[in-house]
Amino acid sequence: MRLFRRILLGTLGLIAALLLFVAGSIVVDALLGGGRVTALTNTTIENPNGPAVRAYVARPSTPGPHPAVIMVHEFWGLREEMVSKADALAREGYVVVAPDVFRGGSTSWIPRAIWQVVSTPTEQVDGDLDAVFAWLAAQPDVQADRIAVMGFCFGGGTALRYSLHNPELAATAVFYGSVISDAERLAVLPGPLLGVFGGADASIPITEVRAFEQALNTAGVPNRISIYDGQPHAFITSGDPATAGGAQAEAWAELVQFLGQSLAGQAMAPSPYTGGAAFAAGFGVERAMHMFVCDLTVRS
C-alpha cells in the first residue's frame, strides 16, 4: 500500500511539474514574442468591437477596383508564411487582408498555439472580422460585393463559421478546417464554398468530409470538396504554394480558379474531383492550405 501511494504521489508530482512547465513556457514565449505581429503587419483597422485589429494587407500592382479576400491564419497566429500567401494571392488580382485575430499572439510553440485557440472567444474573433470586413468593403480599390473569406486549419474552421455569421460574403474557402454536417446551419452560407482536405489527415476523417459535402448538397450550397490523396493535415506549407510543386501548387491553383469563378459571379459546376492530379489534368493548370485544435473552431 505504501508503495502504491509513493507511485501515485510521484506520478501526480510529475504531472504537476509538467503542467507548471507548460504554463511557464507559454508565458515565456508570449514575453519573448511580443513584437512578432507588429513586425509583420502594415495596417491598423479601427474596431468598434474592441482594440484596433493589426493586419497585413497585400494589393495587386494593377489599378482597381478588385475583388478581395480575408485570409485567416492557422492556430500559430499570424506568421511570415501567411504574409507570403497573402502576397501570392494579391499577385492573382485580389486585395488580401491577413488579420491578427489573436490580438498579438504569434508562436511556433505548440502549447501556446493550443492556448491561443482555447483562450480566444469565438465572439471576439467574429467581432474583429466584422471590423476587417467593414474596413475592406469601404476601400476605394475593393469591389464591396465581391469579398471572400478563407483560412487554414484554425483559420479554415473560422472562415466557415464566420460565413454563417456574415451574409454579405461572396464565397468561402476552407483549407483542412473543422467541418459542419448540419444542413440547416449550412443553408445560410451566402455563397459557394471550396473545401480542401488531405486524404491522410488523421484529425479530419474522410467520413466527416463526405458528411460535410452531403450536408452542403442537401442545403443547396454550391460547393467543391477536394481530397488530396496521401496528404496530411496542414499540407500547404510553402509561403508561395504556386511555386512549390505537387499537391501544394495544385491546391493553390484550385483556389485561384474557385475565386475567379465565384467572385466573378460565374456558375460553378459540380466537380467529381478527388485528387490534385485529376484536377490539374482536367483544367489545364499552369501552376503545377495542428490537428485536433481545429475542431474547437466550429464546435465551440
Image (tube, helix red, strand yellow):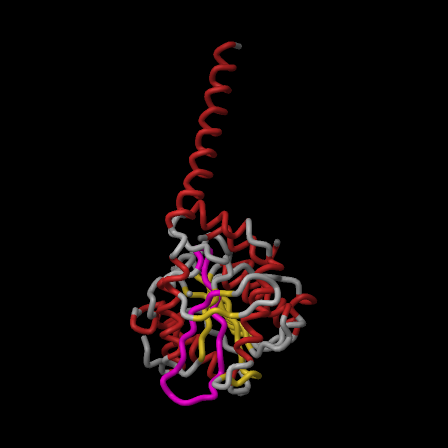
> In the figure, 88 relative to 76: above or below?
below
Tell me, yes or no, whether the highlighted magenta stretch contains residue 69: yes
> In the figure, 160 relative to 92: above or below?
above
Along the line of sight, the residue nearer the viewer: 50 or 279:
50
Question: Taking the image as drawn, is residue 175 in sight?
Answer: no
The residue depicted at 39 percent of the width and 56 percent of the height is 35
The residue depicted at 29 percent of the width and 72 percent of the height is 243
Q: Position of residue 140 (x, y in %)?
A: 50, 86
Question: Taking the image as drawn, is residue 216 in sight?
Answer: yes
Q: Quadrant of residue 239?
A: bottom left
Q: Quadrant of residue 221?
A: bottom right
Q: How many numbered marks are there?
A: 0
> In the figure, 62 relative to 290: above or below?
below
> In the figure, 3 relative to 228: above or below?
above
Residue that protrudes farthest toward the top in the picture: 2
Tell me, yes or no, whether the highlighted magenta stretch contains residue 83: no
Q: Position of residue 144 (x, y in %)?
A: 56, 83
Is 148 left or right of 78, judged from the image as shown? right
Q: Position of residue 79 (x, y in %)?
A: 39, 60
Give the residues drawn in magenta, as a range: 54-77
Is 93 left or right of 187, judged from the image as shown? left
Q: Position of residue 63 (x, y in %)?
A: 41, 90
Is 247 left or right of 121, judged from the image as shown? left
Along the line of sight, the residue nearer the viewer: 224 or 48:
48
Residue that protrudes farthest toward the right in the picture: 184
